[in-house]
C-alpha cells in the first residue's frame, strides 16, 4: 500500500512541470552571478515581496541563519518567541554562526506581548549585550500553523524601529498566511527588514528558499551565504522549480488548508485526542489525552498501517497536509486512529 506521509509539507514531490523546467533551464554560474534562471527567480521574488533584492539559498535554515548573521555582530542579542523554529530547530545556529545570545519570550499562542518585547530590549549599559534583532515566525509551526495577525506585526515593527532594532521574518510558510487571509505578501514584508521564505514546503520545489531585503542587506547576505557554503553553481536547475512554485503553486495552498480543517474535524470525534482550538492553515498538532498512550506508541501503530506523522513531544503529534495527501487519505487516517485499541 502507498505510504501516506503527513510528517511535513517538505515531503512534497516536484510536479511534472517542475521536472520539465529543470531539464530546460538556462544555466550559468550563480556564484559569479550569471545564472539567468536564478536571476529570474530572485527578481520575481523581490517584486512579489516588495523588497529591493532577493537571494536564493539552499534551505530555510540557511536563509534564517544568513539573515541573522547579516543583521548582527558577535556578542549581541536577538529576541524571539520560545517555540520558534530558529530557537528550537536550527541546531543553535545563531550562537554557532553569529556569536549572538538569544532572549526567548514565552507565549501560549506564538504572539509575543509587545510590552514584554519592549522590556526585553536591552538598554545601553556596560553589562548588557546590545539587542540588534527581533525574529518573528509566520505562520507559526509549533502553534498548529497559526497566522500571526498583520496588525500585530505592524505594531511590533513600529516598536522595533522606535528602539532602533531590526526585524527578521521567518516566513517559511508566509504563503499560507497570504492565501488564508488574502493579505498581499508585500504587506507582511513591510513589517520586517528581511524575510526568509521557503519554496520546498507547500510550494513543492525539491530544494530552495529565498531571502528578501534591501540592496545593501542582500549584498552582505550574499557574502555570508558563501561563508556558510551556500554558493551553488548551476543553481538554475533548482531555481527553475522555484519559478513554477511562485507562478503555479501558491493559490492551491487553499486545498491544503481545507484538508487540514477536515482532518481536525474528523479527529475531534476521537475521545483520546484533544484538538487545538482552531486550525488556520495546513498544520495540525493534537494532544493525546489518554495517560497510557504516548506519541511514539501512536505513531508506531500508524506506521504499521503505512501512515507517517511527527512527534512534537511525549503527548503531542503533528500532521501536515500538502498536495500529495487528499481527504480520502484523511478518511483512512481517521479510521485507523478511531479503531486504535487502547
Image: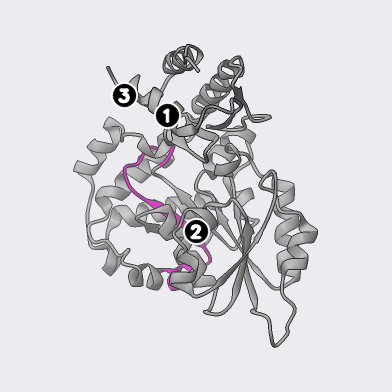
- At x 52%, y 41%, the residue is 313
Which residue is at 61% across, 17% downward?
Answer: 271
Q: Residue 316 in magenta?
A: no
Rendering coords of residue 230 (x, y %)? 32, 63
Measure the C-alpha gap from mark 2 to mark 1.
Answer: 38 Å
Q: Which residue is mark 2?
A: 212
Comparing labels 2 and 1, the label whose residue is closer to the camera: 1
For the magenta stretch, what is the residue range?
201-221
Q: Which quadrant would the N terminus be assigned to in this image? A: top left
- Looking at the rendered structure, the secondary structure element under dot 3 is loop
Q: Is residue 274 above or below residue 57?
A: above
Q: Can residue 216 be seen?
A: no
Q: CA distance from mark 3 to mark 1?
A: 13 Å
Label drawn at residue 3: 3
- Residue extending furthest toward the front: 292
Provide the residue designation for mark 1.
299
Q: Nearer the viewer, mark 3 or mark 1?
A: 1
- Which badge, 3 or 1, is on the more N-terminal residue? 3
Q: Earlier in the sequence, mark 2 or mark 3?
A: 3
Write down the quadrant of residue 9 in the picture.
Answer: top left
Comparing 65 with 6, the one in front is: 6
Q: Is residue 29 visible to us here?
A: yes
- Secondary structure beneath dot 1 equals helix
Q: Residue shown at 24%/37% (left/top)?
A: 19
Horizontal side of 330 relative to 243 (left or right) equals right
The residue carrying pointer 3 sits among few (fewer than 14), some (14 to 19) or many (20 or more) residues within 10 Å by Cα, namely: few
Q: Quarter of the image holding residue 284?
A: top right
Amino acid at each position: 500500500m502507498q505510504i501516506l506521509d503527513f510528517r511535513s509539507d517538505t515531503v512534497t514531490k516536484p510536479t511534472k512541470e517542475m521536472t520539465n523546467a529543470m531539464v530546460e533551464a538556462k544555466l550559468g554560474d550563480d556564484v559569479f552571478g550569471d545564472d539567468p534562471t536564478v536571476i529570474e527567480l530572485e527578481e520575481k521574488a523581490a517584486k512579489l515581496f516588495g523588497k529591493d533584492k532577493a537571494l536564493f539559498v539552499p534551505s530555510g535554515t540557511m536563509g534564517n541563519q544568513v539573515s541573522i548573521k547579516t543583521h548582527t555582530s558577535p556578542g549581541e542579542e536577538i529576541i524571539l518567541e520560545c517555540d520558534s523554529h530558529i530557537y528550537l530547530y536550527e541546531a543553535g545556529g545563531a550562537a554557532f554562526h553569529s556569536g549572538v545570545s538569544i532572549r526567548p519570550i514565552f507565549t501560549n499562542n506564538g504572539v509575543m506581548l509587545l510590552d514584554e518585547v519592549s522590556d526585553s530590549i536591552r538598554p545601553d549599559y556596560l553589562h548588557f549585550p546590545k539587542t540588534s534583532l527581533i525574529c518573528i515566525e509566520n505562520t507559526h509551526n509549533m502553534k498548529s500553523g497559526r497566522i500571526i495577525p498583520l496588525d500585530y506585526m505592524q505594531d511590533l515593527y513600529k516598536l522595533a524601529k522606535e528602539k532602533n532594532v531590526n526585524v527578521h521574518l521567518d516566513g517559511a510558510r508566509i504563503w499560507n498566511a497570504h492565501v488564508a487571509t488574502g493579505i498581499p505578501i508585500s504587506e507582511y514584508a513591510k513589517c520586517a527588514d528581511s524575510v526568509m521564505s521557503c519554496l520546498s514546503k507547500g510550494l513543492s520545489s525539491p530544494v530552495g528558499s529565498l531571502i528578501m531585503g534591501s540592496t545593501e542587506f542582500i549584498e552582505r547576505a550574499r557574502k555570508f551565504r558563501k561563508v556558510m557554503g551556500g554558493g551553488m553553481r548551476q543553481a538554475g536547475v533548482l531555481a527553475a522549480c522555484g519559478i513554477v512554485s511562485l507562478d503555479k503553486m501558491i493559490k492551491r495552498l487553499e486545498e491544503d488548508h481545507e484538508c487540514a480543517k477536515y482532518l481536525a474535524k474528523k479527529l475531534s470525534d476521537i475521545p483520546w485526542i484533544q484538538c487545538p482550538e482552531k486550525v488556520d492553515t495546513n498544520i495540525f498538532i493534537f494532544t493525546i489525552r489518554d495517560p497510557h498512550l504516548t506519541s511514539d506508541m501512536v505513531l508506531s501503530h500508524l506506521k504499521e498501517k503505512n501512515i507517517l506523522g511527527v512527534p512534537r513531544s511525549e503527548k503531542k503529534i503533528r500532521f501536515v497536509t500538502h498536495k500529495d495527501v487528499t481527504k480520502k487519505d484523511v478518511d483512512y487516517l481517521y479510521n485507523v486512529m478511531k479503531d486504535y485499541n487502547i
